[in-house]
Amino acid sequence: MELLAAPFDPLQSLATWQARLRIGSPPIGGAAEAHFIGRVRPVASDGAPLEALEIEHYPGMTEGRIAAITQALAHLHDVAAVLVRHRIGRLKPDEPIVLVAVVADRRGPALRCCQEVLESLKHEAPFWKREWVNGCGHWVAGNTPL
Amino acid sequence: MGLSWGNPMTSGELRVRLFAGLREEAGWQERSLAHQSGMTAVAVWTLLNLGGTAPPATVRVAINHEFAALDTPLANGDEVAFLPPISGG
């Protein structure tokens, strides 16, 4: 789990994580992997062109909640490994916000765990988004529909 | 009951934190508050004049980085945070 204050390349992060798992002792692997990459939408919730998205978090609690979420869901779905990388700070449209990856023995647990981790991040990890349009910021009061 | 702004925590105090829209509405992000036996997050909200007699239903409370019920008794040294609607991921 990592919170990132600067832009990141999710595919490079994924490749680095996969390589680390392979060289672990013992190596961690599985026949199924599920990945999710979330990016900043180009428009604000009112449809106006988005200038930037700011993400605030609660230092300490956010990391603790993400660790608890990933551990609980990895155990529940019996998956081999879970990766979460999440941006904080000011992001431009189309920049990656979040990467979730899960390694498991079968596609069902991998896909279910990946989706549940993502939904838990949206609702149970203390992040707040502020949309910036024409120099004005507006706090987002919730999440987009699934 | 004493309030202070930005002072180091001492024994017998609570640290209160606000985030995002709540922080901007209140105009502050962190305060220290003298702890009294039986004090709850609702009492802290009211004492600090954060609006009404209790947080709106959309506001969640965290005590020492864990979600908690509004009526959980607070202890000396606790960190209480009021969290507006979360929007991660």
Image: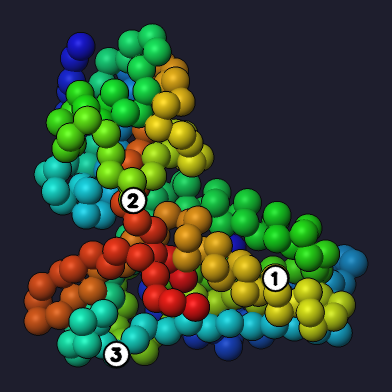
Is residue A38 shown left or right of residue B79?
Answer: right
Tell me if B87 is positioned left or right of A66 in this view: left
The answer for which chain carries disc 1 is A
Which chain does the residue under circle 3 lie in?
A
The extreme right residue here reads A26
Is disc 3 on the same chain as disc 2?
no
Which is nearer the N-term, disc 3 or disc 1?
Answer: 3
Q: Type of residue at label 2?
A: Thr
Which image quarter: residue B51? top left
Q: Which residue in the protein does label 3 denote?
A: A42
Q: Position of residue A40 (x, y in %)?
A: 36, 83
Residue A31 falls in image quadrant: bottom right
Front disc: 2 or 1:
2
At horizontal 35% and vertical 39% (from top left) the residue drawn is: B81
Question: Do marks 2 and 1 share a chain?
Answer: no
Marker disc for residue B58? 2
Q: Distance between the residues labelled 2 and 3?
A: 27 Å
The percent coordinates of residue B8 (x first, y second) are: 28, 24
